[in-house]
Image (tube, helix red, strand yellow):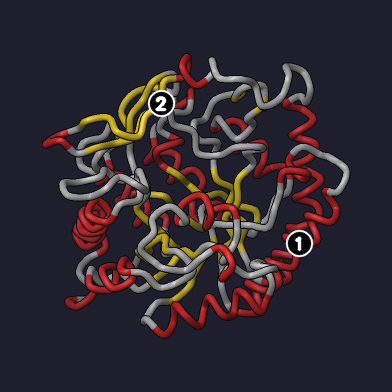
Amino acid sequence: MIQLSEFLPPRPESSWKLIRQAGVTNVVGVLNGGEQDQRMFASVGSSGWQIEDRDEVPWSLKALRNNKELYEKWGFNLIATEDTAPMDKIRLGQDGRDEQIDQIIEQIRALGSLGVPTFAYNWMALSSWGRTDVDLVDRGGALVTGYVQSVAQSAPPMLLDGEISAEEMWSALEYFLKAVVPEAEAAGVRLALHPDDPPQSVDRGVPRIMSSVANYRRMLEMMPSEYNGMTFCQGNFALMPEVISNMTSIPELIREFGTAKIPFVHFRDVKGTVEEFRETFHDSGQTDLAECVRAYEEIGFDGAMRPDHVPTLEGESNNAPGYEMLGRLFAIGYIRGLEHSVYGHPARS
């Protein structure tokens, strides 16, 4: 069966109880003081922990063990982390990258010693998840996020054109993979590289190299290993040029890459193109999600899968666009229904 999971902050909050009530027991965690923690959860305000409560070295074995034990007290199993030690010097090939790689290796070794099998990361330097709108009105007044490329690219550049090239970022990625894939193999931890979000070739002067299916094939061939894989974020792959042009489809890509290259899935959908798109409810996007689940069953996928980027529903504040709770509960039920219809109901198997 799919290991249906949720993305939870590193300290207890009300969402933990709701997720347990929805029947989810697997967690994709963040570091207590990592970049994802501070960006995605600090503004929510429901958990009560403060900046000074965060770990000084959040990627250390001590910090990760504490996070894992907290999750376990609530009945959760930590099966992946989606947060890292700082990486921008690595991504940009700058002085100091070896020290950052050492920190990533420390995190991978810690995950291995704790039995956490998946390490998700991205190659988006200087900024990550990009949206120009966080409150577009969808059905029934629900709010969704969206992106208009022309608006986003009119903002000041993060780097001047030509300051770093795409090939230099490819070289930096190869340098990184050569250093960490052997460590991941030794630790028994699978690396899962997330696509650029949005998957465009450049973002305000910064090259984005994980933005096409062809580039993913190149990355996987660069360091062939079961431990060098991808976070198969369906919403991003749906916007890649090969999919938009109908050269391939999301279910076809699932079957192509298979379990050997997909340890982790973000199950979400969009409407539009990389030039202009919006997030959707799971039942109203442009991808055949039922066929996706059939493809996962065909390849024998039994890894972590979590819903991602959900609408904000009635009564919610939209303080955490894409991550409010009611849409996540809707998504969990939707995915569980598809899973049972394809894989079979476990209580009857």
What percent of the width, then of the height, locates residue 83? 57, 57
Residue depicted at 64% across the width and 41% down the height: 123
Indicate which disc, 1 or 2, sits on the residue closer to the N terminus.
1
Give the Cα separation between the discs numbered 1 and 2.
Answer: 33 Å
Residues at circles 1 and 2 in contact by the CB criterion of under 8 Å: no
Determine which residue is flagged by label 2. 147
Measured as percent of width and height from the top left, residue 131 is found at: 44, 31
Residue corresponding to mark 1: 103
Residue at coordinates 35% horizontally, 63% vertically from top-left? 46
Q: Which residue is drawn at 77% across and 37% down?
A: 92
Amino acid marked by disc 1: Gln
Position of the N terminus, as image quadrant, is bottom left
In this rendering, the answer to whether 145 lies above or below 48 is above
Total marks placed: 2
Left or right: 216 in relation to 180 = left
Relative image position of residue 49 (x, y in whole percent): 47, 68
Q: Percent x, y for residue 263?
A: 51, 58
Residue found farthest to the left: 140
Q: What amino acid is at disc 2?
A: Tyr
Circle 1 crowding by C-alpha within 10 Å: few under 14, some 14–19, many from 20:
some
**Which residue is more in the foreground, 45 or 72?**
45
> In the image as oriented, which residue stretches furthest toward the bottom?
73
Helix, strand or loop under label 2: strand
